[in-house]
Structure formats: C-alpha cells, structure tokens
Image: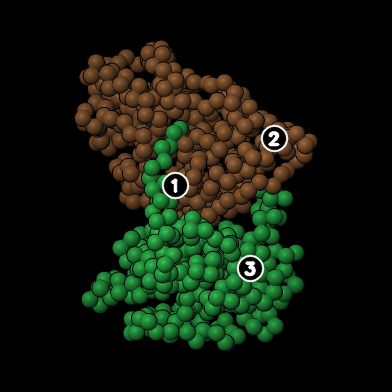
Amino acid sequence: MVIAIGFEGSANKLGIGIIRDGEVLSNCRRTYITPPGEGFLPRATAEHHRNNILEVLREALDVSGVKPKDIDVICYTKGPGMGSPLVTVAVVARTVAKLWNKPIVGVNHCIGHIEMGRLITKCHNPTVLYVSGGNTQVIAYSNQKYRIFGETIDIAVGNCLDRFARVLKLSNDPSPGYNIEQLAKKGKTYITLPYAVKGMDVSFSGLLSYIEEHAASLLSSGKCQPEDLCYSLQETVFAMLVEITEERAMAHCGSSEVLLVGGVGCNERLQEMMGIMCSERGAKLYATDERFCIDNGAMIAQAGLEMFRSGTTTSWENTTITQRYRTDDVLVTWRSP
Amino acid sequence: MENFEGFEKVRQGAEARIYVGKYLGKLTLVKERFEKKYRHPDLDASLTKDRIKAEIRAIMRCKIAGIPTPAIYLVDLERRSIFMEYIKGLTVKEYVEKSEAEFSEIRVDGRGNLNNMLHQLGLRIGHIVARMHCSNIIHGDLTSSNILICPGNCDGGSELEEFGIDELMVTIRDSLCRSPSNQDYKLVIIDFGLGKTDSSAEDKGVDLYVLERALLSTHPKVAPKTLFPAIMKGYTDKCGKSAPEVIAKLDEIRMRGRKRTMVG
Ligand SMILES: Nc1ncnc2c1ncn2[C@@H]1O[C@H](COP(=O)(O)OP(=O)(O)O)[C@@H](O)[C@H]1O
Ligand SMILES: [Mg+2]
C-alpha cells in the first residue's frame, strides 16, 4: 500500500490531498477570491497560501485519519504556475519532507490533472482536452510522453473567460467561469464573435479584444444583454475547442475516448457539446466534477504516487519550482510505451 | 447526395463527407461539409458558408498564381458542397508512410535513399508554400493529408478503375529518385477551408508553424531531421527577400509556446 500527500498552489487555489492506492482519503482546498473586475496577483496570492496552508494541512490529515508516519511520499507542484505561490507551497512540502523524513517528488501540474482524470473516470487511453486559466491543450499519450496535438497560440481559454468576466464586472466568487456559465443559461440572442482555429491550434486574443472593444456599445445600445454575451462567448469558444479535439487528435490517434480536465472542464455546456460530438463519432466522453476538475491537492498526490511507484523521486537539490514546465517535457515512466 | 446517381461515399472526415462519382462526364469529388450538431445552428451555418467561400477563393487565387489545385466544377451552398476535380494520386501522408515502411523492408542501403527522396519532396513542398505566400495566400491548415502527390500525367482519364496504389507509388518514387527536379510528378494542394487571401508575416509564420506541428506529430521519425528542414530550405530558396521576416515570426511563434507561463 502506498500513501501520498499532494501540495498544490500554482494559481489562486491552495489544495492539499491524501491518496492511498488510488483512493482519495482527503482533498481540502481554499480559494483566493478577488473583488469583481480584478485578477489575482502573485504576491497577494502567495500571501493567501501562506496564511492558510497550515490549517489546510491539519484539515487534510484529520479528514484522512492518516498519521504522518504512514505517509510514503510527499508530492508538490513543481510548475507551471506563478512563481511566488509555487515557492510558498514548495517550502512547506520540503519542510514536512525533512520533518517526517520522507522522499519527495516534484509534479508537473498538467500531468496531475490528466492522472486525476484517468483515476476518477477509469478511462484507458483518452484524447485529453485540458482547459484551465493558464492552459488550453489537446493531448494524447504516445511513447512515454503526453504529446500536445493542439494548443492555444496566445492566451488560455480560462484566461479569456476570466478577462471577459472582468469586462462585465462579474463576481469572481466562486469563479468567474462559473458565473459566466450561470448567466449564459439565461442568454437568448446569439451574437457572432470572432472564431479562430488555425490548423490544430486555437487563438482567443482576437475574440477577447473584440469583446473589450465592443461590449460597452453592444450593451448600451440594447442590442444584447450581458446574458447574451456570456451565451455567445461560450458557444463560440467551446465550438473551437470541440473542433480541435475532434479534427486533430481524435482523427489522428483513432481514439474513442475523450477526457475533459482543468477548471473549464467542469462547465456543463462544454461537457454537453463535447458529449454530442463524441456520440456522433461513437466515442465516449469522460469528465469529472469541480472537486477534481479544479486545481486540487489530490491530483498532485495521484501523479506523484504514480511517479513514486515507477521509481521516480526528486533529489533534494532539484526540489525547486519552475514557472514554465511543458506537459511534453515529462517522461511518463508509469505507463507502458 | 441522393439526387446524384453513381456517387459513392468514400470517406467521412471530422468536417466533411467525401463522395466520388461522375459529373458531366468527369471523375468528380464532392466535399460536403455536414452539419455539426454540437454547435449553435447559426454558428454552424456561418462557419460552413465561410469555409466553402474561403476554399473557393483560395483555390481561384492559386489557379491565377499557377499553383496546382483541383478544378472547381460546382459550388452548392444549399447542399453545403463543392464539386471538384478528382485527383488520382496519394496524400503526401500516405506516400511518406508507405515509403518509410517499404524502405525499412527492402533496406536498399537504407536510410540514405529514403532521406534523399524525402529531402527532394520537402524542397518541392517548400517551393509551393513559398509560391502561395508570395501571392498572399494563406492555407490555414497545411498538413501532409492536405497535399496530394500524383504522376505528372495524372489529369485526363475519367474512370476510377485501374487505380493501383502500388503502381502509383513506384511511378512517383522513380521520378523523385531519378531526377529530383523533374516534373514527372505533381503536388496538388487541397482543403483550403481555413484559407485566407490577404496576409501578414504573422499569418505566414503561423501557416508554417501549423505545418511543422502537423508533420512532427504525423511523421515523428522523418519530419524533424529530413522533411521539415527540406521544406524550410525550399521555402527560403524560393521566397527571396521576404523569407527572413517570416522565419523570424516562425521562431517567435514557437517561443511563445515555450515561454508562456501556464497558470492553473
Ligand atoms: N480533389 C481531390 N482529389 C483526390 N482526393 C481528394 C481530393 N480532395 C480531397 N481528397 C481526399 O479526401 C481527403 C479529405 O479531403 P479534405 O478536403 O482534406 O477534407 P477534410 O476537411 O475532411 O480534411 C483528403 O485528405 C484526400 O485524401
Ligand atoms: Mg484535409
């Protein structure tokens, strides 16, 4: 039996989770929420994590009923993400590794999402759409790497949604994306917005600047309501995402499974659209809910546990963080070639 | 396609159904961009229409610039279809994959020949992309499936029969190996639905980036060292003065991905 504890804090979510052989024993989280119209900045986010991490650690241990001595490996997010929040969390992970005298592994955040999705949904070899505040990637496994088939050539889809929410001054509680989704349900009028698929990649910056430029006049002229803008935005960006998932990766890999991961992955409209595409192709969609889709500690524990079981640990000198860390940089030692 | 007798569905891609049959006595391929149920009907209708128009416009511009593309016979927006000349040939993807398989089987002093042949092919692809870009045509979805390769005399003939892939392979490979620069075979560009007919250096850079990414994932063994470098050489040779700016853009676009901090 292997027990792993995972520490995550690469963005505005702070999470610590404990996993025993694929069973989630605890998965505790705090989110740093900023006022409407504002994004989260590195320094304030790091401060939030610093102020909360010991309490979250205590909670994760208590909920799981696991004693530090029972834990086999400490896992933390090495990157990608924002520098100071990453450091804040890594410092605590390093400290407990020394205190409890345990091996430590640095985990790629994106791989954490993928492995958690595979664990929860029990899919085998899916085409993965990874969509979050910082990432938009279509990924498929081959030959010990998670290879990136398509991605954004500018900003991430979640970033596009967040900044759109700021333009409309929507609340960031619990997340801008959630509030866009709720408003979109009430939208009726569909407005054409820039749609940008380039080969297997997508681009959102043109769409965002279009909104930034035109939102005020569209709303004040009564052409549409905020609900309609949310609705049209979702219809447009999600169609782009489904298109690159289908056209490229699935066609290329002959894949019949799609796994949706990352914070945007819990959007029900995106799940619905992806589901329709899958059923038309005789494929199956796998998705998780906000407990596992949104950044959390258990996902880092799960990926770290897989690494640890396949013989990978991180040497003390290498327990650093890195803001840039690509999904395809990691050698996937725990899956067959 | 029910009203057109003798047309047979030969392929269902992600975006389009492909039918082949006879139209006005000519061997014709019909590309029908079918409805996507997952997207909003208005979005679906406007994307389909835009892409059919983009495809026709880019093919016309290529024709004017002397770049080989299928002849367009009919455009039917109602039916969401383009009727075009059927090219008897292989996709570059099929050609490269078959060549890889055969060369490793025969081991005719091995990779030297394969590399040489692919280098010649890459140069030719580079030339064509350069000619498109010089005419301000952006393809938008350059992949090895969207370039067809066929013997130089492939036009004419109205029958689909006696279409021997192996024979084609031999003809094409012979002409590639024997005299690299000869015109015994032709490259035909297809699938311009994401095309544009006005362009900046950024667009051209993205076009090459898309091609590079597609080749690296489709042909991981030969693309990095042989095929793509040859394409870039062919491109640079043909493009002249404007090449450095586009290549600088390509580098910048590649770096954007590497440099991006990926939060969350
Ligand atoms: N004019 C043509 N002649 C012969 N084969 C063609 C022609 N056009 C398309 N094809 C074949 O059909 C496939 C799909 O057509 P394409 O236009 O690329 O549509 P898709 O959007 O589905 O990729 C091509 O990869 C090629 O094999
Ligand atoms: Mg194609």
Q: Kindly identify the amino acid type of the residue bearing the numbered disc 1.
A: Ile
Which residue is at a point 46% across and 25% down the rendered structure image? A41
How many numbered circles are shown? 3
Chain that appears green: B
Which residue matches tag 3?
B57
- Asked if the residue under mark 3 is in contact with the one under mark 2, i.e. CB atoms within 8 Å, the reply is no
Q: Nearer the viewer, residue B39 or B64?
A: B64
Which residue matches tag 2?
A216
Residue density around tag 1, few if under 14, some if 14–19, many if 20 or more, within 10 Å: many
Question: Could you say where residue A180 lies in the image, as x and y percent from the top left?
Answer: 63, 32
Which secondary structure, mark 1? Answer: strand
Chain that bears disc 1: A
Residue density around tag 3, few if under 14, some if 14–19, many if 20 or more, within 10 Å: some
Q: Kindly identify the amino acid type of the residue bearing the numbered disc 2.
A: Ala
Badges 1 and 3, same chain: no
Which residue matches tag 1?
A139
For residue A116, which quarter of the picture? top left
